[in-house]
Amino acid sequence: QGQLQESGPGLVKPSETLSLTCTVSGDSITDYYWTWIRQSPGQGLEWIGYSHYTGSTKYNPSLKSRVTISLDTSKNQFSLKLTSVTAADTAVYYCAREGTAVGMAVWGQGITVTVSS
Amino acid sequence: DIQMTQSPSTLSASIGDRVTFTCRTSQSIGHWLAWYQQKPGKAPKLLIYKASSLETGVPSRFSASGSGTDFTLTISSLQPDDFATYYCQQYNGFPYTFGQGTKLEI
């Protein structure tokens, strides 16, 4: 079973870009759909989007103009970039592995990102 | 977006009880539904996929059913480790969406 680990800054200033990396171990990044999900304090779960090594990407339309998910096959990592952040983007961000039609079976532990000046 | 409605929001139960959670979607999603368990400070854990398929390693006291717009998750005999929040998630259409969760408490 693969393992995922998020990394990145825990504090981002408003209007700047949030950048997170998810390191994949035990799996090849050329398999599966690699996904980001976030959870705001006291709120539910929001799917941000996914990327597949074939180039297939899907984003949540609520974030689509600001979000990019990309894969680095040489490092077995994938990343999330979210531009022009506001306090509303403060959340715990999770990376996850999604199999074809079988849900998200592997999750990272989550990383808390606060947007504040 | 496909709206997900879970009920109840909170469920109080005791060890050994049989409990059922409900998830309803705003449009038909076939059987493209997953259930997750989340404990405080932890990532969600996949329990069920394709509406009724038990994820490897998940105890058999968990079962689920449904298709179309109405789905249920059942725990046959509650154990202390089961007290958590449970979320349903549809993956029939983009964006994927989650229910607001049902908190299972003692």
Image (cartoon, rainbow, N blue to C red):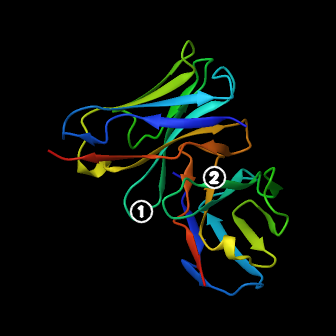
Comparing B6 with A34, the one in front is A34
- Secondary structure state at the residue bearing disc 2: strand
Vertical comparison of A72 with A110: above or below:
above
Label 2 vs label 1: CA separation? 18 Å
Q: Residues within 10 Å of mark 2 (few under 14, many from 20)?
A: many
* The quarter of the displayed image where residue A53 is located: top right
Which quadrant of the figure contains the C terminus of chain B? bottom right
Residue A22 vertical position relative to residue B87 in the rendered view, above or below:
above
Image point (63%, 36%), residue name: A3
Residue A6 seen in this snapshot: yes
Give the label on residue A43, or none. Answer: 1
Residue B28 makes an appearance in the image: no
Q: Quadrant of residue B38?
A: bottom right
**Place of residue B53 in the rendered image (x, y in percent of width and height, measured from the top left):** 82, 54
Q: Of the residues shown, which amino acid type is indicated by label 1?
A: Gln
Residue A112 place in picture, x, y as percent: 37, 48
> Which subunit holds the residue at mark 2?
B
Residue B1 position (above or below residue A61): below
Residue A54 vs B47, above or below: the answer is above
